[in-house]
Image: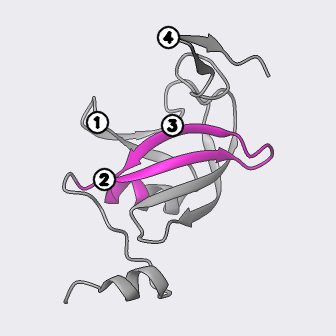
Amino acid sequence: MTAPDAAEREQGTRFLPRFDDKGLLTAIAVDSASGEILMVAFMDAEALARTRETGLAHFHSRSRGRLWMKGETSGHVLRVEDIRVDCDQDALVLIVKPEGPACHTGARSCFYRRIEGEGLAAITT
């Protein structure tokens, strides 16, 4: 099979994920109710397949070098309601229903701080 051309990938109707040289796609989890960005992670082909099969978000842990399901130890799973694909199919947005905090720190979102001056400040809203 030949590689898909840009027009087919960008304007066609076939799902043709474009994994990077490490076999990964960027995946952004967004809360379906609030629209808040909860986390950014990476998916390999196995994580993408398991997510689609189970409806629960699975990712590739770069630090552990293995597949992991969000919430596998905490129980704070992300139930995937929709998967959106960017124009060149190298990034995904997972529209999710979180069952608990998304961040390993216990914060609702991994994006709980903002840059203020030379430091960081908690986002309180």
Query: Which residue has dot 1 on it?
Result: 62
- Sequence-wise, the earlier of marks 3 and 1 is 1
Query: Which residue has dot 3 on it?
Result: 70
- For label 4, the SS is loop
Give the label, 4 or 2, closer to the camera.
4
Q: Label 2, label 1: how many angstroms apart (C-alpha)?
A: 10 Å
- For label 2, the SS is loop
Give the label, 4 or 1, closer to the camera.
4
Is the residue marked by circle 3 packed among few (<14), some (14-19), or many (20+) residues within 10 Å? many
- For label 1, the SS is loop
Give the label, 3 or 4, closer to the camera.
4
Q: Label 4, label 2: how many angstroms apart (C-alpha)?
A: 32 Å
Query: Which residue has dot 4 on it?
Result: 118
The foreground one among 51 and 105 is 105
Q: Which residues are magenta?
A: 23-48
Q: Is residue 100 left or right of residue 119?
A: right
Q: Is residue 115 left or right of residue 88?
A: right
Is the residue marked by circle 1 packed among few (<14), some (14-19), or many (20+) residues within 10 Å? few
- x then y, percent, for residue 68: 40, 39
Callout 3 amino acid: Lys
Callout 1 amino acid: Arg
**In the rendering, which numbered label is found on residue 24?**
2
CB contact under 8 Å: marks 2 and 1: yes
Callout 2 amino acid: Leu
Q: Residue furthest front?
A: 117
